[in-house]
Amino acid sequence: MDSAYDDKFDTEAIAPITEACGAYYLELWHGATIAFKDMALSILPHLMTTAAKKNGRTEKIVILTATSGDTGKAALAGFADVPGTGIVVFYPKDGVSPVQKLQMVTQRGDNTCVVGIEGNFDDAQTGVKKLFTDERVRGELAAAGYVFSSANSINIGRLVPQIVYYVYSYATLLREGKIKDGDEINIVVPTGNFGNILAAYYARAMGLPVKTLICASNENRVLYDFFGTGAYDRNREFILTSSPSMDILISSNLERLIYHIAGDDADKDRELMAKLLSEGRYEITPSMREQLTMFHGGFATEEETLAEIGRVYRQAHYLIDTHTAVASAVYAAYREKTGDATPTVIASTASPFKFPRAVAQAIDVPADGDDDLALAAKLAEVTGRTLPKAVRELSSAPVRHSGICAIDGMEQAVKGFLKI
Ligand SMILES: *Cc1c(COP(=O)(O)O)cnc(C)c1O
């Protein structure tokens, strides 16, 4: 724990809470890569290497990761130069922000490999899952002394550390006298792969007094539709938005929730997931739906997202990123509609400086001809904030990874890196 949550974070609080516009923003982006993925991925390598040692495993662990932008860099930062591990990251070549891409392709460490794929995040994630479950590939790896593991939220080692900060947010509000012991809170999570909000669901299941879990989507509103209708349907256009880390149509961790609401029934879960694979669609039963009453689904359009960044900045002089803005906008609409005044924690998942173009546009800072790094610097100056080190160091970092592959070239890319 001490090696995970040290001065890689730019604040001793690790996950500070800022009150603005009638909500509590739980800032999860003070780590090395300025997104919430650092919260779990700072500790995952420690958990993994300790577990391997305890279990007497001697193979080299190869971390295979698909990223919609933030997991990749956070995993690379966590695993770079960790003895006994190697890491391969696949990102959608045209589906991440310029800062996210620069962060990844400049990654140091001889055990790291970063490859852009000619497809979207769902293609990357499906490809990685295929490699994981392919007996032939696993056998070839084992023969060469390797074993696959994941840094994606399909790895429970990602979700467990995420449960902690929801409990911590409650304890903080209690300590600061904002709530009384036993009071309920709402939690709002900007959602893509359904990992972060599932961690909040687990915290609730463990006894945290949570009234409503508000699942916020961007224009890829497949989860909003799911909570509204009980039908999950990925047969729709994949939209590239200003919150790229949520541009996902197959929310991997929903599978875990489905398992629980089916009565911890793995067969039923498998049946529905098989349908998702073959038809791109499945529907849950009315009795399963009844167990979702603690969830509220909402979504924000691109326009609403930018307007929310502007509103929060004007009203509270508080700067939020595009992902957090999706959650913030969904919460504002929820509160307006329901009048629910329960104290509410919004998971703030990335630093605004990671997405400077959209944020600058939202608060009327002219972009002129600036590239994203120059724009981030300008944004810091105009808003009187310190430009995070993670962005500052990018301008001088050499590009070390330039690999691109087709969707069906992922296996070859991994083998090439491992020289097998
Ligand atoms: C990954 C990510 C999300 C979505 O989190 P999930 O656990 O995939 O639902 C939201 N915001 C940011 C900034 C992210 O990096």
Image (cartoon, rainbow, N blue to C red):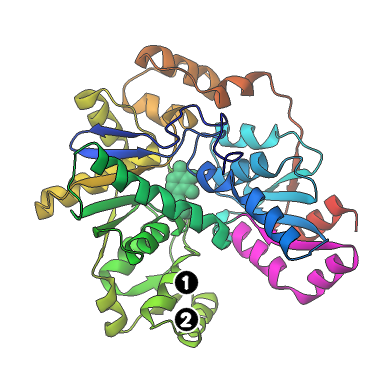
**Percent position (x, y) of residue 92?**
61, 48
- Beta carbon at label 2 within 8 Å of ligand 1: no
Residue 369 lies in the magenta-colored region: no
| Side of 146 where 176 appears, left or right | left
State the residue lying farthest toward the bottom.
Answer: 267
Residue at x 61%, y 64% (from the top left corner): 126
Q: Nearer the viewer, residue 208 or 362?
A: 208
| Side of 35 where 229 appears, left or right | left
The residue carrying mark 1 is 255
- Residue 204 seen in the figure: yes
Residue 126 lies in the magenta-colored region: yes
Residue type beneath disc 2: Asp
| Quadrant in which the C terminus appears | bottom right
**Percent position (x, y) of residue 393?**
62, 21
Q: Is residue 294 above or below residue 219?
A: below
Residue type beneath disc 1: Glu
Helix, strand or loop under label 2: helix
Residue at x 36%, y 18% (from the top left corner): 365
Residue at x 41%, y 37% (from the top left corner): 15
| Quadrant in which the N terminus appears | top right
**Percent position (x, y) of residue 300?**
29, 48
Q: Which mark is residue 58?
A: none
Helix, strand or loop under label 1: helix
Q: Are marks 1 and 2 in contact (CB under 8 Å)?
A: yes
The residue carrying mark 2 is 269
Q: Which residues are magenta?
A: 123-151
The mark nearer the N terminus, 1 or 2, is 1
Q: Quadrant of residue 74?
A: top right
Q: Nearer the viewer, residue 109 or 177?
A: 177
